Amino acid sequence: MQSREYFLRVCFTLCLIHKCWAFAFHPLQLPTSVRGVRASACNSAIRHASTTNGISHSLRANEGSFTSSIVKRKQASLVQTQASSSAASDGSSRSMLPAGWQPGDTPMGGCVSNLIKNIVGSGVLCLAGGVAAFSDQRQTLVLALGIAFTFAAIAGYCFAMIGKVCEMTGAKSYTEGWAKTVGESTAWIPNLIVVFKTWSACLIYSMIIGDLFSDLAITAGVSQVAGVAVNRNSILLVAHLFGLLPLCLLRSFTFLSYASFLGIGGLLFTAFFMILRLVEGSYAPGGVFFNQLVATGGKNVVVSSFDVMGTKLIKSLILISMLTNSYLCHYNAPKFLRELKDATRKRFDTLTYSSFFGAFLMNAIYMVAGFLTFGGMSYGLILNNYATSDLLATISRGAIGSSILLGYALTFDGFRTSILEFMKVKEPTQKLKDVIACVFIASVCAGSMVLSFSPPLDI
């Protein structure tokens, strides 16, 4: 329990740093022409003050000429300011792509779909458990949804800001954007955070794989294979050695790109079935699956719980730590800017805010449907709450588990790229890549055996 609490708090701290650094770019939004007008105005004021002190008698003698000069200066300043404002307004229709970038050809709809898939992952299955960690009262969902929307808005703003930084500095990557704005000496910070984020994402995926396939083995009635007990740890060991490690050792991950479509399909199907079970009351007292769970676990089994524990706001930090991870895809902002067709500032902002709002809606559906079904008994992986005899839950476990297995290597590729950049290795050998893959799989497998979503989150 202490190891899970420590892990979540580390995630919370690093992800807050990851989100907040983009606010340092805010002064860069000021157009160069506007900064020039302000500097010119300040210089004019200084020159005017020094001139006035030195030749006040001449000014009195030539009051008419001086007044005419002031009028002309004001008119010139007004014209320059209007031109600057016009240039700033035209920026919304001017391409954001820095010099040397090839224009993208992906339409807005395709980019929005891809970005939502990039934002929303299997982490949405944990959000109901995050609410249950600090409350079992239904009205708490209002607060939880407010927090989720706030983080979506902040994350969307930061994503848009990174795109603008690329426009203004010519940066072609997340780390380069930091180096050109904050400084070269600290450019390792965002790189290290991306390394941690991708590693922790794969750790969560491994934990989900262990829980999902354990339930599938129970549903299939498989308890032993070749004399070896089939349990969570043995499933994790086999999955990492014979499934995930060979995938991570592949020379190219191009053919795995379709896995994102399977993933979003599995998430949409799972959302549908969760809403269906909530509406029909299958897990409410007297429901079909409620009775099955009670019959299996005995009369003391608690399927759902409401208004028993109350609300402990300090534990809402668990939900907050989850939500800081739910919208993290900022290192891909340059990629989406490069791929967007007609990448003007207005279109990039439309892509950003519509995608993050769509991700918020997906998170809200999982959070609300899961919590209203099980309340304070919602597990850290909500699918663990559903009966192994529930056919729709079984299909969801299989779809999401398979999509994670196929998409796992893509997340690992992001980890490997970031760790090599952190090590400043520009042309790594294949042997080095393989060593990184083996160490990575060993560490993630060990971590997933220690941590589990099965019990409700608590501290």
Image (cartoon, helix red, strand yellow):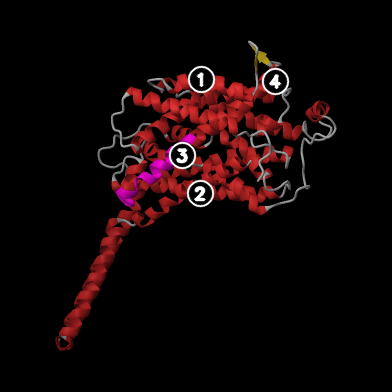
Tag 1–tag 2 contact (CB < 8 Å): no
Q: Quadrant of the N terminus?
A: top right
Magenta stretch encompasses residue 342: no
Identify the secondary structure beneath mark 3: helix
Residue flagged by tag 1: what amino acid is it?
Leu
Q: x and y percent of residue 202 in the render?
A: 51, 32
Q: Which mark is residue 196?
A: 3
Q: x and y percent of residue 381 in the render?
A: 64, 34
Residue flagged by tag 4: what amino acid is it?
Ile
| In the image, residue 213 above or below residue 2 | above
> How many residues crowd around disc 4 within 10 Å: few (fewer than 14), some, or many (20 or more)?
some
Residue 372 in the figure: left or right of residue 108: right
Nearer to me, 2 or 117: 2
CA distance for labels 1 and 2? 32 Å
Point out the tag, 1 or 3, that comes first from the N-terminus: 3
Point out the tag, 1 or 2, that comes first from the N-terminus: 2
Marks 1, 2: nearer the viewer:
1
Disc 2 target residue: 13
Q: Which mark is residue 241?
A: 1
Point out the tag, 1 or 4, that comes first from the N-terminus: 4
Q: x and y percent of residue 423 in the render?
A: 34, 37
> How many residues crowd around disc 3 within 10 Å: few (fewer than 14), some, or many (20 or more)?
some
Q: Residue at x 41, y 50 (%)?
A: 22
